[in-house]
Image: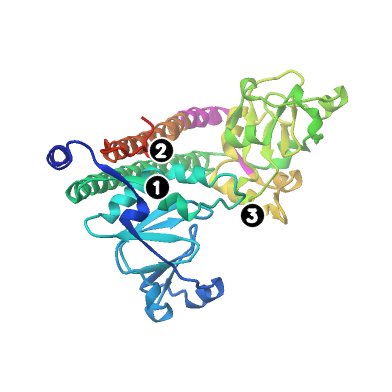
Amino acid sequence: MSRLNELIQELCPDGVEYKKVKDVYKRLRGTSITATKMKEINISSGEIRIFAGGKTVINAREKDIPKANITRVPAVLVQSRGIVDVIYYEKPFTFKNEMWAYTAKDKIEVKFLFYMFKNNIMKFREAASGTGSLPQISLSVTEEFLIPVPPIEVQHEIVRILDNFTELTTELTTELTTELIARKKQYEYYRDYLLSHKRYEVRLIPVGELFDFKNGINKGKESFGAGTPIVNFTNVFRKNKIYSSELQGRVQVTDEEIERYSAKKGDVFFTRTSETKEEIGITSVLMEDIDRCVFSGFILRARPKTELLLPEYCAYCFSSTEARKYIVRHSTYTTRALTNGTVLSKMILPVPPLHIQKKIVDVLDNFDAICKDLDIGLPAEIEARQKQYEYYRDMLLTFVETGDTILPDQTRDN
């Protein structure tokens, strides 16, 4: 950034002037095109993009849009409603009139405004708070916003640096995300390979011969918050093994209910109902006895009635691709996805000898630990890189002011 420092020292060593956005940039107007008309003209190969708010973007042909509404210069688009955000776009486009855009006047870099807005996006969103399910900012939020206006050469250099930072950050995030996905696929491959009955002699046994199923307890809201430990949906959904230290839920129950809905070491729990089929039949095993513990009505308890399966093995065997396909395929869906003990009892489970189960568990425990480290490490690295980028962006866009202008808190906090 030595070039930038040289430019600042040469062109604005004593600071820069802050001006309102409306005094520096030209505001563009959108189109009043209706949602019905948008559906009629949405052409995937159209040369004009129409931004309609939020994530809605369609393509249209030039003949379908009034020429006066088409923006043909680089501009910064402000999404003012719902998802408050900013977009930089260089190709011909138009936008719904609930949004607005800015383009450059003389000796001003429009992408410099994009980075200024992006750096202050949280302040814009805070200005829209308290406006209901679709937060909306008013035009004055951006029109009156004060920004530093350094010489055009300084603006160009800042944009060049931030473009490079953006590209590098995007590349790194993509690489880390790809690595995380690849490692998870590798884990799933080896898990399915180890759980396959093709590798060793197994017995194929219906799940109903191995477990007794029971629905959990249902209580009113007033019963929760104190009392005995309870295994909840989230305990089962998040981890394949449950320990007493992870049970934060408490419920008030009778001795008779404890007897009927008891949870003990070795019990396998299935998520019974959820919004999607993909969240149905996720399993977890209680790995230790917990005094007076019960389980929720949103999960099923599968209590072993043989000694053919190790509890640790049960933590994995129902997560194989084949088992998941069966569970999803045979679940029902009306207002919510649902499975039950009758359906699960008919599933055929390959059961290897106990010593083979132990070897499989040892390998999968190691794989699981590696994947958990990746789940923590790689997203943390992505977040760290993003914060580093935001730090440098903020630093590059902060200038000492000149003159007697008193800046509000919106422009800088220090």
Q: Secondary structure at mark 2?
A: loop
In the figure, is residue 212 to the left or right of 54?
right
Q: Quadrant of residue 130?
A: top right
Residue 156 lies within the magenta run: no
Q: Which residue type does callout 2 highlight?
A: Pro
Asked whether the beta carbons under mark 2 and mark 1 sit within 8 Å of each other, the answer is no
Q: Which residue type does callout 3 highlight?
A: Arg
Which residue lies under the disc numbered 3? 329
Expressed as whole percent of the image width and height from the top left, the position of residue 346 reads 71, 47
Would you place residue 9 above or below residue 75 in this image? above
Q: Quadrant of the N terminus?
A: top left
Image point (70%, 27%), residue name:
249
Tell me the magenta residue range. Answer: 349-366
Badge 3: few (under 14), some or many (20 or more) residues near its Cα, within 10 Å? few
Expressed as whole percent of the image width and height from the top left, the position of residue 36 reads 56, 74
Expressed as whole percent of the image width and height from the top left, the position of residue 353 reads 58, 32
Evaluate whether residue 353 shows in this view: no
Name which of mark 2 and mark 1 comes first in the sequence: 1
Image point (67%, 36%), residue name:
233
Q: CA distance from mark 2 to mark 1?
A: 9 Å
Say which of marks 3 and 1 sits in front: 1
In the figure, is residue 205 to the left or right of 366?
right
Which residue lies under the disc numbered 2? 408
Name which of mark 3 and mark 2 comes first in the sequence: 3
Q: Secondary structure at mark 3?
A: helix
Name which of mark 3 and mark 1 comes first in the sequence: 1
In terms of depth relative to the viewer, which is nearer, 269 or 2?
2
Which residue lies under the disc numbered 1? 145
Residue closest to the far bottom: 63
Q: Secondary structure at mark 1?
A: loop
